[in-house]
């Protein structure tokens, strides 16, 4: 039995189990009345934090015309996303131009890892099972968190839904089907069960199929500004088949909580590749099989003065990459990653205003590949974080230091030189008026990233003598919010942050005499200055009407100082970093109808640090609309939604040579039995 057959069979078993559980549940003739869910942009998103913090909860996520977590994160300020197009295209993000590898992505509180290349494809995480997405610059400043939380320049926290049951009910079924442009067929199902008063279970499965074929217009202008060519073509080799299956158990005994999750994602996709003159089709393919099992335990003791948290995880990732095109270079490689992770964290509230925390993590990563002369690296990473937090009515202060200890071993038995580093951080928040939710905040953080296995040991590009990449972060900002549920302006929030980041020993790939053998080098320094701003407003009027509006804006000057100061390229804007970008998200609801409008703007950029006309990339923007209707029928909550993306059919590229889809449509039908 092939690996693909096994994965599709496992998804089928999950779906069968869900149907069996629903069929066998007790019948009920109780009429449940469901009111339309309110949405509040500001109340939960702009909670008091010592660091810049943004949130999208489930009410907002459900109304956006988004397929994946990556699509939703685009609406946060300060975020840049690499998107290579199509339903199955790889999507990675970075915050404030510090690079994708400086991002920490946490799934239910435990970091998603990729020791091979350091990047997490957020396109594979569906929104169907997501409760909220949080974005932090720096890190969370909570009392109880793992050492990993302290170890990233920016963090994204993805929280899955915890089942909530109607009174007297123990079963819940949520079914959804999406279809639309590019041959999309995307059914999903989630079944939740209240086993007893302290234990709940959730099982979900999802299947995605798309041909990925869409028309695009490709234009090229020569050095004189004249049109060199103007071609309309169809995007090829962008198909995808994917299966996601998850099972989770939730335990809640008040102060003692725990959760266990099993996750598997299998995909078979084409890689459409870059578009150039007379080159519109590629034949590369990639198969991914990602599995992890993780658990988290939390408890509070001694009148909530002492906290304990234990996290554990095992992950196995399989990647098969095939390039059958012998005119370039025939490649048929398989990679297998394994990760084992354990974290223990404790906190003690010594006084009501003083808390001390200690976290210890251990992580082991191994990479296997069928490459010639491969190093087969094995990495052991230890992290110890010590933090102290002082909290007075008008002032909060937290200081922390993270110790990181890394040991690598390669196939010939040679142990690479061990590496250790201390990373300090300090956070301050001041509220001048106790009864006014106006905060002034500032933080400093120094962090680094170790070179990935690809950076160090990949046969074609690795360099085992690389140094870590360092970042110094400085931030000053303010935030204000209020909430008056009974007034027309029900809630309002604004936050503005100015920041300065210095990146040292930046790791880059440098070309060599062999086009297929690049070398990784520590090459220079980057200086990043910018401003993030966001405004959230909620309105209610005439009892049944409500409006939520969110505006986000980012200005960034990301200067590449890697060249000699006499070079004309010195200080050029980093590749694909716009000076100006922003977004608008708006929801209007009347009774059971909801209309959502979203807008994204990305300003002018360059495809290289050499900011010359040939590398210029035009600005782009998209308008998306969705209209949904919610209907309650006995115990069912039925919802239909029509979505139109890229309403004005703009032809654009996020990455040069990778055209994005024009106008496309999606129909979503969901049914919730509670």
Image: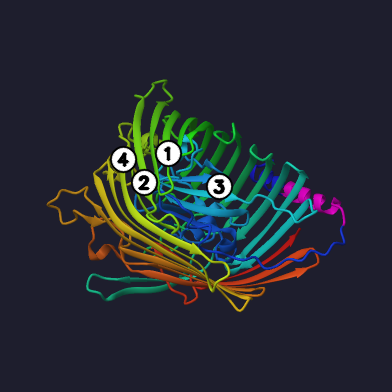
Q: Image point 23% across, 57% down: which residue? A: 572
Residue wearing tag 4: 470
On residue 287, the disc is 3
**Is label 2 or label 3 in front?**
2
Binning the other alpha carbons within 10 Å of mark 2 as few (below 14), some (14 to 19) or many (20 upward) gives many
* Residue 303 spot, x, y in % from top left: 59, 34
The image quadrant of residue 172 is: bottom right
State which tag comes first along the sequence, 1 or 4. 1
Q: Main secondary structure of the magenta part?
A: helix
State which tag comes first along the sequence, 1 or 3. 3
Residue wearing tag 2: 428
State which tag comes first along the sequence, 4 or 3. 3
- Magenta stretch: includes residue 24: yes
Q: If the image is split into quadrants, where does the C terminus sit?
A: bottom right
On residue 389, the disc is 1
Binning the other alpha carbons within 10 Å of mark 1 as few (below 14), some (14 to 19) or many (20 upward) gives many
Q: Image point 57% across, 45% down: which residue? A: 108
Q: Secondary structure at mark 2?
A: strand
* Residue 652 spot, x, y in % from top left: 41, 68
Q: Secondary structure at mark 1?
A: strand
CA gap between label 2 and label 3 equals 46 Å
State which tag comes first along the sequence, 2 or 1. 1
Q: Secondary structure at mark 3?
A: strand
Range shown magenta: 12-27
* Residue 60 horizontal side relative to residue 416, left or right: right
């Amino acid at each position: 039995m092939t690996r693909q057959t096994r994965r599709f069979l496992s998804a089928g078993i999950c779906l069968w189990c869900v149907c069996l559980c629903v069929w066998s549940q007790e019948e009920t003739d109780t009429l449940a009345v469901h009111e339309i869910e309110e949405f509040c942009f500001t109340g939960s998103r702009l909670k008091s934090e010592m660091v810049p913090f943004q949130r999208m909860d489930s009410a907002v996520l459900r109304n956006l015309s988004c397929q994946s977590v990556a699509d939703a994160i685009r609406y946060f300020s300060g975020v840049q996303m690499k998107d290579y197009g199509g339903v199955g295209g790889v999507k990675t993000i970075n915050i404030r131009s510090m690079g994708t590898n400086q991002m920490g992505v946490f799934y239910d509180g435990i970091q998603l890892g990729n020791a091979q290349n350091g990047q997490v494809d957020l396109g594979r995480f569906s929104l169907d099972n997501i409760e909220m997405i949080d974005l932090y610059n720096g890190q969370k400043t909570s009392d109880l968190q793992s050492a990993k939380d302290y170890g990233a320049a920016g963090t994204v926290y993805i929280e899955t839904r915890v089942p909530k049951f109607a009174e007297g009910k123990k079963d819940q079924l949520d079914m959804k089907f999406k279809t639309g442009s590019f041959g999309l067929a995307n059914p999903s199902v989630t079944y939740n069960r209240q086993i007893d008063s302290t234990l709940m279970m959730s099982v979900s499965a999802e299947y995605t199929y798309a041909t990925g074929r869409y028309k695009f217009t490709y234009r090229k202008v020569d050095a004189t500004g004249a049109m060199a060519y103007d071609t309309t073509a169809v995007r090829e080799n962008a198909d995808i088949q994917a299966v996601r299956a998850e099972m989770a158990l939730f335990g809640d005994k008040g102060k003692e909580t725990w959760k266990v999750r099993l996750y598997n994602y299998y995909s078979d996709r084409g890689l459409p590749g870059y578009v150039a003159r007379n080159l519109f089709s590629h034949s590369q393919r990639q198969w991914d099989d990602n599995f992890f099992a993780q658990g988290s335990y939390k408890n509070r003791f001694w009148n909530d003065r002492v906290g304990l948290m234990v996290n554990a995880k095992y992950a196995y990732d399989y990647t098969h990459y095939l390039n059958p095109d012998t005119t370039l270079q025939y490649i048929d490689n398989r990679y297998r990653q394994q990760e084992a992770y354990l974290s223990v964290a404790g906190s003690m509230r010594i006084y009501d205003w003083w808390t001390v925390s200690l976290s210890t993590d251990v992580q082991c990563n191994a990479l296997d590949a069928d490459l010639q002369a491969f190093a087969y690296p094995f990495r052991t990473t230890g992290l110890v974080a010590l933090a102290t937090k002082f909290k007075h009515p008008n002032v909060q202060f937290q200081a922390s230091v993270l110790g990181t200890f890394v040991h690598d071993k390669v196939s010939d038995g040679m142990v690479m030189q061990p590496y250790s580093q201390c990373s300090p951080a300090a956070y301050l928040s001041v509220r001048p008026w106790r009864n006014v939710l106006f905060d002034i905040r500032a933080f400093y953080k120094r962090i680094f990233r170790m070179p990935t296995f690809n950076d160090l040991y990949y046969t074609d590009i690795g360099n085992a003598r690389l140094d870590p990449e360092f970042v110094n972060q400085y931030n000053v900002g303010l935030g204000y919010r209020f909430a008056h549920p009974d007034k027309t302006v029900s809630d309002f929030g604004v936050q503005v942050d100015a920041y300065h980041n210095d990146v040292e020993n930046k790791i880059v790939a440098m070309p060599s005499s062999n086009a297929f053998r690049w070398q990784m080098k520590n090459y220079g320094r980057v200086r990043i200055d910018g401003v993030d701003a966001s405004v959230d407003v909620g309105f209610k009027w005439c009892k049944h009407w409500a409006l939520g509006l969110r505006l986000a804006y980012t200005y960034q000057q990301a200067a590449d100082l890697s060249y000699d100061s006499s070079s004309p390229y010195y200080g050029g804007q980093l590749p694909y970093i716009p000076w100006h970008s922003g977004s608008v998200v708006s929801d209007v609801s009347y009774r059971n109808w909801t209309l959502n409008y979203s807008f994204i703007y990305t300003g002018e950029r360059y495809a290289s640090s050499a900011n010359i006309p040939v590398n210029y990339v035009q600005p782009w923007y998209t308008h998306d609309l969705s209209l949904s209707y919610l209907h309650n029928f006995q115990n069912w909550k039925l919802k239909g939604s029509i979505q139109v993306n890229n309403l004005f059919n703009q032809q654009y590229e996020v990455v040069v040579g990778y055209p994005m889809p024009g106008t496309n449509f999606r129909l979503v039908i969901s049914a919730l039995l509670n």
